[in-house]
Image (cartoon, rainbow, N blue to C red):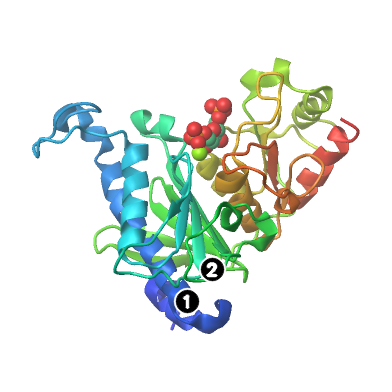
Amino acid sequence: MNLKHQTLGEFVIENQTAFHNSTGEFSKLLNGIGLATKLVNHEINKAGLVDILGGVGDINVQGEAQQKLDLVANDMFIDTLTKREIVCGIASEEEESFISINSLDFQNKNKYVLLIDPLDGSSNIDVNVSVGTIFSIYRRVTPEGSPVKLEDFLQKGSEQVAAGYVIYGSSTMLVFSTGHGVNGFTLNPAIGTFYLSHPNMQQPEDGEIYTVNEGNRDFFTDGMKKYIRYCQAGNDDKSPYKARYVGSLVADFHRNLIKGGIYMYPCSAMDPKGKLRLLYECNPMAFLAKQAGGGESDGKQSVLDIKPTELHQRVPFFTGSKNMVKKLESFLEGE
Ligand code: AHM
Ligand code: MG
Protein backbone atom coordinates (compact mmCIF):
# COMPACT_ATOMS: atom_id res chain seq x y z
CA MET A 1 0.00 0.00 0.00
CA ASN A 2 1.12 3.53 -0.69
CA LEU A 3 2.28 4.77 2.73
CA LYS A 4 0.26 7.94 2.39
CA HIS A 5 -2.96 5.95 2.17
CA GLN A 6 -2.33 4.31 5.52
CA THR A 7 -4.71 5.21 8.34
CA LEU A 8 -3.62 5.60 11.95
CA GLY A 9 -5.32 2.29 12.81
CA GLU A 10 -3.50 0.46 10.01
CA PHE A 11 -0.19 2.07 10.94
CA VAL A 12 -0.56 0.98 14.55
CA ILE A 13 -1.37 -2.62 13.57
CA GLU A 14 1.44 -2.76 11.01
CA ASN A 15 4.00 -1.44 13.48
CA GLN A 16 2.76 -3.29 16.53
CA THR A 17 5.70 -5.65 16.57
CA ALA A 18 8.04 -2.68 16.88
CA PHE A 19 6.04 -1.40 19.87
CA HIS A 20 7.42 -2.33 23.24
CA ASN A 21 6.94 -6.10 23.70
CA SER A 22 3.73 -5.82 21.71
CA THR A 23 1.06 -7.18 24.00
CA GLY A 24 -1.45 -4.97 22.18
CA GLU A 25 -1.76 -2.71 25.24
CA PHE A 26 0.39 0.00 23.74
CA SER A 27 -1.49 -0.13 20.42
CA LYS A 28 -4.79 0.24 22.25
CA LEU A 29 -3.39 3.22 24.07
CA LEU A 30 -2.37 4.95 20.83
CA ASN A 31 -5.79 4.30 19.35
CA GLY A 32 -7.41 5.64 22.55
CA ILE A 33 -5.39 8.84 22.22
CA GLY A 34 -6.47 9.12 18.57
CA LEU A 35 -10.11 8.81 19.63
CA ALA A 36 -9.84 11.39 22.42
CA THR A 37 -8.17 13.73 19.95
CA LYS A 38 -11.14 13.55 17.61
CA LEU A 39 -13.55 14.34 20.44
CA VAL A 40 -11.48 17.35 21.49
CA ASN A 41 -11.13 18.47 17.88
CA HIS A 42 -14.91 18.47 17.55
CA GLU A 43 -15.25 20.74 20.60
CA ILE A 44 -12.52 23.10 19.39
CA ASN A 45 -14.14 23.48 16.01
CA LYS A 46 -17.28 24.69 17.74
CA ALA A 47 -15.37 27.27 19.79
CA GLY A 48 -16.08 30.12 17.36
CA LEU A 49 -19.78 29.59 17.92
CA VAL A 50 -19.68 30.44 21.64
CA ASP A 51 -21.51 33.72 21.05
CA ILE A 52 -24.33 31.75 19.54
CA LEU A 53 -24.18 28.60 21.63
CA GLY A 54 -23.21 30.27 24.91
CA GLY A 55 -19.86 31.12 26.53
CA VAL A 56 -18.00 29.98 29.63
CA GLY A 57 -20.23 30.08 32.70
CA ASP A 58 -23.46 30.10 30.66
CA ILE A 59 -25.94 27.30 31.14
CA ASN A 60 -26.27 25.01 28.11
CA VAL A 61 -29.39 23.24 26.89
CA GLN A 62 -28.77 20.28 29.17
CA GLY A 63 -28.78 22.67 32.10
CA GLU A 64 -24.99 22.31 32.60
CA ALA A 65 -22.61 25.23 33.03
CA GLN A 66 -20.26 25.67 30.03
CA GLN A 67 -16.66 24.88 30.91
CA LYS A 68 -13.47 26.42 29.63
CA LEU A 69 -12.17 24.42 26.68
CA ASP A 70 -8.93 23.43 28.38
CA LEU A 71 -10.97 21.80 31.13
CA VAL A 72 -13.27 20.18 28.59
CA ALA A 73 -10.22 18.73 26.80
CA ASN A 74 -8.80 17.55 30.11
CA ASP A 75 -12.02 15.73 31.02
CA MET A 76 -12.30 14.19 27.56
CA PHE A 77 -8.82 12.70 27.58
CA ILE A 78 -9.13 11.42 31.14
CA ASP A 79 -12.61 10.02 30.57
CA THR A 80 -11.80 8.34 27.23
CA LEU A 81 -8.64 6.68 28.52
CA THR A 82 -10.04 5.76 31.93
CA LYS A 83 -13.12 4.07 30.44
CA ARG A 84 -10.95 2.02 28.10
CA GLU A 85 -8.80 0.84 31.01
CA ILE A 86 -5.63 1.22 28.96
CA VAL A 87 -3.39 3.15 31.33
CA CYS A 88 -2.80 2.74 35.04
CA GLY A 89 -2.33 6.44 35.79
CA ILE A 90 -2.65 9.89 34.28
CA ALA A 91 -0.99 13.17 35.22
CA SER A 92 -2.30 16.32 33.59
CA GLU A 93 -1.18 19.93 33.52
CA GLU A 94 -4.75 20.75 34.56
CA GLU A 95 -4.71 18.54 37.68
CA GLU A 96 -2.80 19.27 40.84
CA SER A 97 -2.02 15.63 41.53
CA PHE A 98 -1.84 12.46 39.44
CA ILE A 99 -4.80 10.12 38.97
CA SER A 100 -4.53 6.42 39.78
CA ILE A 101 -6.94 4.41 37.64
CA ASN A 102 -8.44 1.67 39.73
CA SER A 103 -11.97 0.63 40.50
CA LEU A 104 -13.54 -2.01 42.73
CA ASP A 105 -14.33 -4.34 39.84
CA PHE A 106 -11.12 -3.71 37.93
CA GLN A 107 -7.64 -4.54 39.06
CA ASN A 108 -5.49 -2.41 36.83
CA LYS A 109 -2.67 -4.49 35.34
CA ASN A 110 -1.72 -1.93 32.70
CA LYS A 111 1.92 -0.99 32.34
CA TYR A 112 1.74 2.58 31.07
CA VAL A 113 1.21 6.01 32.56
CA LEU A 114 0.18 9.00 30.51
CA LEU A 115 1.24 12.60 31.07
CA ILE A 116 -0.71 15.21 29.21
CA ASP A 117 -1.17 18.90 28.53
CA PRO A 118 -4.73 18.62 27.20
CA LEU A 119 -4.95 22.06 25.59
CA ASP A 120 -1.75 23.99 25.29
CA GLY A 121 -1.79 27.63 24.21
CA SER A 122 -5.46 27.89 25.17
CA SER A 123 -5.34 31.70 25.26
CA ASN A 124 -5.29 31.44 21.46
CA ILE A 125 -8.69 29.74 21.34
CA ASP A 126 -10.65 32.99 21.57
CA VAL A 127 -8.91 34.38 18.51
CA ASN A 128 -9.11 31.30 16.29
CA VAL A 129 -5.38 30.59 16.36
CA SER A 130 -3.90 27.08 16.51
CA VAL A 131 -3.73 25.26 19.83
CA GLY A 132 -2.52 21.78 20.68
CA THR A 133 -2.46 18.75 22.92
CA ILE A 134 0.87 17.32 24.10
CA PHE A 135 1.30 13.83 25.53
CA SER A 136 3.96 11.55 26.84
CA ILE A 137 3.94 7.85 27.79
CA TYR A 138 6.16 6.01 30.27
CA ARG A 139 6.28 2.47 31.52
CA ARG A 140 5.47 2.43 35.23
CA VAL A 141 8.35 1.67 37.61
CA THR A 142 6.26 0.37 40.55
CA PRO A 143 4.80 -3.16 40.45
CA GLU A 144 1.95 -3.85 38.02
CA GLY A 145 -1.44 -4.29 39.65
CA SER A 146 -0.72 -1.87 42.53
CA PRO A 147 -1.89 1.77 42.63
CA VAL A 148 0.52 4.09 40.79
CA LYS A 149 2.86 6.29 42.78
CA LEU A 150 4.48 9.67 42.18
CA GLU A 151 7.71 7.96 41.13
CA ASP A 152 5.92 6.43 38.12
CA PHE A 153 5.53 9.98 36.78
CA LEU A 154 8.80 11.57 37.95
CA GLN A 155 10.94 9.76 35.40
CA LYS A 156 13.60 11.30 33.20
CA GLY A 157 12.40 12.24 29.71
CA SER A 158 14.91 9.77 28.30
CA GLU A 159 12.66 7.00 29.71
CA GLN A 160 9.69 7.99 27.53
CA VAL A 161 8.40 5.13 25.39
CA ALA A 162 6.32 7.45 23.22
CA ALA A 163 5.38 11.09 22.92
CA GLY A 164 3.42 13.25 20.57
CA TYR A 165 1.22 16.22 19.98
CA VAL A 166 -1.93 17.16 18.19
CA ILE A 167 -2.16 20.46 16.39
CA TYR A 168 -5.64 21.85 15.91
CA GLY A 169 -4.80 24.16 13.03
CA SER A 170 -5.90 24.74 9.46
CA SER A 171 -6.09 20.98 9.54
CA THR A 172 -5.81 18.72 12.57
CA MET A 173 -2.64 16.66 12.78
CA LEU A 174 -1.43 13.99 15.17
CA VAL A 175 2.37 13.75 15.26
CA PHE A 176 4.02 11.09 17.41
CA SER A 177 7.01 8.88 17.94
CA THR A 178 7.37 5.52 19.62
CA GLY A 179 11.14 5.80 19.46
CA HIS A 180 11.38 4.77 15.82
CA GLY A 181 11.25 8.15 14.05
CA VAL A 182 8.43 10.66 13.90
CA ASN A 183 5.26 10.26 11.87
CA GLY A 184 2.50 12.78 11.21
CA PHE A 185 -1.15 11.96 10.51
CA THR A 186 -3.72 14.40 9.14
CA LEU A 187 -7.38 14.13 10.06
CA ASN A 188 -9.94 13.83 7.30
CA PRO A 189 -12.76 15.49 9.23
CA ALA A 190 -15.46 14.25 6.86
CA ILE A 191 -14.94 10.65 7.94
CA GLY A 192 -13.03 11.14 11.19
CA THR A 193 -9.95 9.22 10.05
CA PHE A 194 -6.28 10.10 10.49
CA TYR A 195 -4.10 9.41 7.43
CA LEU A 196 -0.32 9.12 7.44
CA SER A 197 0.53 12.37 5.65
CA HIS A 198 4.07 13.01 6.96
CA PRO A 199 6.02 9.72 7.21
CA ASN A 200 9.42 9.79 8.89
CA MET A 201 9.61 13.54 9.62
CA GLN A 202 13.12 15.02 9.73
CA GLN A 203 13.99 18.43 11.12
CA PRO A 204 16.41 20.40 8.90
CA GLU A 205 19.82 20.67 10.60
CA ASP A 206 19.87 24.44 10.05
CA GLY A 207 17.14 27.00 9.83
CA GLU A 208 16.41 30.69 9.51
CA ILE A 209 13.53 31.17 11.93
CA TYR A 210 13.84 32.21 15.56
CA THR A 211 10.87 31.89 17.88
CA VAL A 212 10.81 33.67 21.24
CA ASN A 213 8.57 36.08 23.14
CA GLU A 214 10.72 39.14 22.52
CA GLY A 215 8.46 41.26 24.70
CA ASN A 216 10.39 39.75 27.62
CA ARG A 217 13.79 40.65 26.16
CA ASP A 218 14.77 43.22 28.81
CA PHE A 219 14.40 40.47 31.42
CA PHE A 220 16.57 37.92 29.58
CA THR A 221 20.17 37.11 30.47
CA ASP A 222 23.02 38.77 28.54
CA GLY A 223 23.70 35.57 26.61
CA MET A 224 20.10 35.40 25.42
CA LYS A 225 20.08 39.07 24.44
CA LYS A 226 23.29 38.54 22.46
CA TYR A 227 21.88 35.46 20.72
CA ILE A 228 18.77 37.39 19.68
CA ARG A 229 21.00 40.12 18.27
CA TYR A 230 22.95 37.41 16.42
CA CYS A 231 19.66 36.12 14.92
CA GLN A 232 18.77 39.61 13.76
CA ALA A 233 22.19 40.52 12.36
CA GLY A 234 22.83 40.02 8.68
CA ASN A 235 26.39 39.77 7.37
CA ASP A 236 28.36 37.94 4.70
CA ASP A 237 27.78 34.60 6.40
CA LYS A 238 24.08 34.86 6.99
CA SER A 239 20.93 36.90 6.39
CA PRO A 240 18.88 38.05 9.37
CA TYR A 241 16.59 35.28 10.58
CA LYS A 242 12.82 35.57 10.38
CA ALA A 243 11.01 36.10 13.69
CA ARG A 244 7.92 33.91 14.08
CA TYR A 245 5.97 33.53 17.33
CA VAL A 246 2.46 32.12 17.54
CA GLY A 247 2.45 31.73 21.33
CA SER A 248 1.25 28.12 21.03
CA LEU A 249 4.17 25.79 21.64
CA VAL A 250 2.69 23.08 19.42
CA ALA A 251 2.19 25.43 16.47
CA ASP A 252 5.62 27.04 16.86
CA PHE A 253 7.32 23.67 17.27
CA HIS A 254 5.47 22.13 14.31
CA ARG A 255 6.47 24.94 11.95
CA ASN A 256 10.11 24.80 13.02
CA LEU A 257 10.11 20.99 12.76
CA ILE A 258 9.09 21.21 9.12
CA LYS A 259 10.89 24.37 8.01
CA GLY A 260 13.88 24.49 10.37
CA GLY A 261 14.24 27.04 13.16
CA ILE A 262 14.68 27.42 16.90
CA TYR A 263 12.04 27.73 19.63
CA MET A 264 13.14 29.40 22.88
CA TYR A 265 11.47 29.90 26.23
CA PRO A 266 14.39 30.96 28.41
CA CYS A 267 14.47 31.81 32.08
CA SER A 268 14.16 35.52 32.77
CA ALA A 269 14.09 37.90 35.70
CA MET A 270 10.30 37.40 35.65
CA ASP A 271 10.38 33.60 35.33
CA PRO A 272 13.69 32.56 36.94
CA LYS A 273 12.94 28.87 36.30
CA GLY A 274 11.43 29.38 32.85
CA LYS A 275 7.74 29.01 32.10
CA LEU A 276 7.22 25.68 30.39
CA ARG A 277 6.58 22.47 32.28
CA LEU A 278 9.24 19.80 32.08
CA LEU A 279 6.87 16.83 32.20
CA TYR A 280 3.95 18.01 30.10
CA GLU A 281 5.60 20.26 27.52
CA CYS A 282 9.40 20.07 27.32
CA ASN A 283 10.08 16.33 27.61
CA PRO A 284 7.61 15.20 24.93
CA MET A 285 8.75 17.91 22.52
CA ALA A 286 12.41 17.12 23.22
CA PHE A 287 11.77 13.41 22.57
CA LEU A 288 10.17 14.26 19.22
CA ALA A 289 12.92 16.71 18.28
CA LYS A 290 15.57 14.11 18.99
CA GLN A 291 13.69 11.45 17.01
CA ALA A 292 13.47 13.86 14.06
CA GLY A 293 17.20 14.64 14.17
CA GLY A 294 16.72 18.01 15.90
CA GLY A 295 18.19 19.46 19.07
CA GLU A 296 16.86 20.26 22.55
CA SER A 297 18.33 21.78 25.67
CA ASP A 298 17.63 23.68 28.88
CA GLY A 299 20.58 25.89 27.90
CA LYS A 300 23.21 23.58 29.38
CA GLN A 301 22.09 19.99 29.01
CA SER A 302 19.46 17.84 27.36
CA VAL A 303 16.15 18.31 29.19
CA LEU A 304 15.70 14.55 28.73
CA ASP A 305 18.47 14.00 31.32
CA ILE A 306 16.84 16.07 34.08
CA LYS A 307 15.53 14.00 36.96
CA PRO A 308 12.18 15.62 37.82
CA THR A 309 11.45 16.39 41.45
CA GLU A 310 7.85 17.58 41.11
CA LEU A 311 4.96 17.09 38.70
CA HIS A 312 4.62 20.71 37.64
CA GLN A 313 8.34 21.54 37.49
CA ARG A 314 9.33 24.33 35.10
CA VAL A 315 12.55 24.60 33.11
CA PRO A 316 14.04 26.90 30.46
CA PHE A 317 13.55 25.23 27.09
CA PHE A 318 15.17 25.45 23.67
CA THR A 319 14.47 23.17 20.75
CA GLY A 320 14.83 23.15 17.01
CA SER A 321 17.35 22.62 14.27
CA LYS A 322 20.36 20.84 15.71
CA ASN A 323 22.99 23.39 14.67
CA MET A 324 20.90 26.32 15.87
CA VAL A 325 20.49 24.79 19.33
CA LYS A 326 24.27 24.18 19.50
CA LYS A 327 24.95 27.79 18.52
CA LEU A 328 22.52 29.08 21.14
CA GLU A 329 24.18 26.94 23.83
CA SER A 330 27.52 28.55 22.97
CA PHE A 331 25.98 31.99 23.73
CA LEU A 332 24.63 30.78 27.08
CA GLU A 333 27.88 29.12 28.18
CA GLY A 334 28.93 30.09 31.69
CA GLU A 335 25.61 31.67 32.66
P1 AHM B 1 -0.08 27.22 28.77
O1 AHM B 1 0.25 25.80 29.14
O2 AHM B 1 -0.66 28.01 29.91
O3 AHM B 1 -0.94 27.30 27.52
O4 AHM B 1 1.32 27.94 28.47
C1 AHM B 1 2.17 27.39 27.53
C2 AHM B 1 2.28 28.33 26.36
C3 AHM B 1 3.00 27.75 25.18
O5 AHM B 1 2.13 27.12 24.30
C4 AHM B 1 3.58 28.98 24.56
O6 AHM B 1 4.72 28.69 23.77
C5 AHM B 1 3.91 29.84 25.72
O7 AHM B 1 3.05 29.43 26.76
C6 AHM B 1 3.63 31.27 25.46
O8 AHM B 1 3.94 32.00 26.60
P2 AHM B 1 4.02 33.60 26.56
O9 AHM B 1 2.60 34.07 26.38
O10 AHM B 1 4.61 33.95 27.87
O11 AHM B 1 4.89 33.98 25.41
MG1 MG C 1 0.67 24.12 28.45
Question: Horizontal and vertical percent for residue 221?
Answer: 79, 23
Quarter of the image for the C terminus: give it: top right
Which residue was labeled with disc 1? 3
Q: Which residue position is annotated with label 2?
A: 199
The amino acid sitting under disc 1 is Leu
- Residue 248: x and y in percent read 50, 37
Residues packed near mark 1 inside 10 Å, few (<14), some (14 to 19) or many (20 plus)? few
Q: Is residue 76 above or below residue 138?
A: above
The answer to which of 270 and 44 lies nearer the viewer is 270
Q: Is residue 234 visible?
A: yes
In-front residue for pair 189/309: 309
Q: How many residues crowd mark 2 within 10 Å: few (<14), some (14–19), many (20+)?
A: some
Residue in the picture at 76% in, 50% down: 302
The residue at the point 8 percent across, 37 percent down is 61
Q: x%, y% of residue 95?
A: 44, 41
Q: Is residue 224 above or below residue 24?
A: above
Q: Quadrant of residue 269?
A: top right
